[in-house]
Image: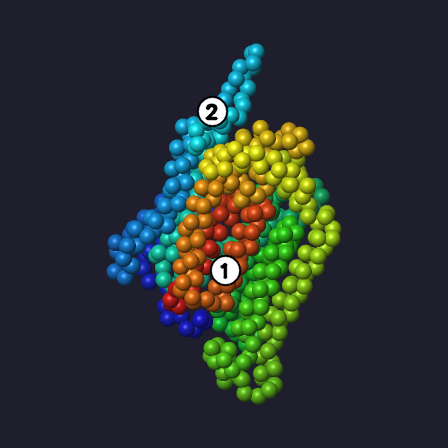
Amino acid sequence: MLEEEVIVKSAKNSNESLLIINTLIMIAMPALLFGGNCNVAAGLFIALGIVAPLNVLNYKRTWVDARAHTNLFYTIALAPCIISFAVAAFGIIDSPFWESDIGSRGYLSLQPARAGIIVSGALSSMGALMPELATISAAACALSLFFVTESRYIIRRIFFFASLFAAAIAVFGFIYSALESIPRFMLPSFGRNAFGTFSDASQWSAFAILWLGASMTVAAYSSQRFRIFTYLYSLKFFSFSISVLLFLSVIFCGKPIDKIFAMVLTAFGCAVLFFDTIPTRANMTRHWTSKYIHGKYKKMRLSVPAIFYALISVFLFAWAASMLVGSAKNPQERVIATDGAEGAVSFAERMAVYEDCKPLLDMKPIFGWGTGSFTNVFAFKQGADLGDAPYATPFSDLLQKLVENGYFGLILTFLTPAFLFLRWLYKRDFSLSGSIIFMSAGLTLVLGVFDSPFQSLAVFVSFWVIMVAAFKWDDCDTR
């Protein structure tokens, strides 16, 4: 569907307006505060999490067209997150650590056999509960989008302003990096591997990939302007420019895998734009420009935008393929500059971390060691080859989830997304623009297997919003 076919170009009730504002604040606030990697950001994020449930309750109470059992289904969708919080709260009662006195000193030992099935290896109760509360807040915000709105207009508006905000951070990151390169020009540091307002450039790359896909979706969903001057003033061109800016930021500071994923996503988005703008009679009619199709010269001239998108798509696919081949041939390409215990973390060091995590998985496979416990419990299994500094992450969100919450926690995490996915398949209503959203969410999910982007609250809530929007997009009205 196109911009001209949108019947309603405004929020139909106050709940949709609040949904837009709340979602944008939930995304922007942690992004501005070091990507959410600070206690202040987490506290504010959790506090704002109450807005979305209240908005859903008010929507059902005040909007006459609200679907029956909205509150019930919303609660059921949030239930896995609530259960995960309850498990974490129950685990606080029991600790896997035991203190022994040897001489005048006290020593801690890891003895899971002397503890219960559900434990918590976090240093404090807040350390165990705050990540769970943040998860509930992110899910509540994203799922409110699924239940409150039935309009693509609302989703597109969220996508446009959030991607515009991400582009502003990218511009700031480029300017800040340029100023830092000037000799004797002293600036405060956001971190030794920072970009923009994010303390970790790899987390910024994941954030940029998510909103790169969103801006590409807005570009694909907007009407094509076949004349150059009208195109330069169109939403399609503006959204495409945002995509290019976010893409360049990933190329500038991302790891090899981040760059490859950004190339693939941008190439796929350009391919969708290509198929949408080929000056065939069907496309021209859809774009309300069929009057321009008469004459071979005009038709050839109108092919320029499609050719432009096609060339970009082919170039980026080829570039990504060459990087994959080069990475396979040259192991040095797989060195990932992660802000870890001792600076850059190589592929071999990553594999050593994975190996040292296996005993932890074997000892607590079902419920894990408790949310926020990785650093503490891994210290007892960390090999000498990894040094003596504690590791805050195993450089894999998937592995950290298994260590901290076990297979039960992993199942809870995917329960609601799996239900939404099955519902989406049952509807059998797919679109090319919607496929871009799915690809951006899917690529970020894959990054979570090989890296730790979801340790950033900004990435985490953005992923939830884009994932839920992907399931809702093809189920929406075109209003």
**Above/below status of 353 relative to 54:** above
Q: Are marks 1 and 2 in contact (CB under 8 Å)?
A: no
Residue that mark 1 sits on: 437
In percent of the image, x 39 and y 52: which residue is there? 143
Residue 339 vs residue 48, the one in the foreground:
339
Q: Is residue 254 left or right of residue 32?
A: right
- Which numbered circle lies on residue 284? none
Q: Is residue 334 left or right of residue 131?
A: right
Q: Identify which amino acid the numbered label 2 is placed on.
A: Arg
* Type of colouring: rainbow
In percent of the image, x 64 and y 41: which residue is there? 350
**Above/below status of 291 relative to 177:** below
Callout 1 secondary element? helix
Callout 2 secondary element? helix
On the image, the x and y values in percent for residue 18 come to: 36, 54
Q: Is residue 215 visible?
A: no
How many numbered marks have been drawn onto this rendered protein structure? 2
Judged by depth in the image, the label closer to the viewer, 1 or 2, is: 2
Q: Residues within 10 Å of mark 1 (few under 14, many from 20)?
A: many
In percent of the image, x 55 and y 73: which residue is there? 275
The alpha-carbon separation of the residues under discs 1 and 2 comes to 47 Å
Q: Residue furthest top?
A: 103
Residue 310 vs residue 475, the one in the foreground:
475
On the image, the x and y values in percent for residue 316 come to: 65, 63
Q: Residues within 10 Å of mark 2 (few under 14, many from 20)?
A: few
Q: Quadrant of the N terminus?
A: bottom left
Residue 181 vs residue 27, the one in the foreground:
27
- In primary-sequence order, the first of circles 1 and 2 is 2
Residue that mark 2 sits on: 114
Q: Identify which amino acid the numbered label 1 is placed on.
A: Ile
Q: Is residue 342 visible?
A: yes
On the image, the x and y values in percent for residue 151 come to: 38, 63
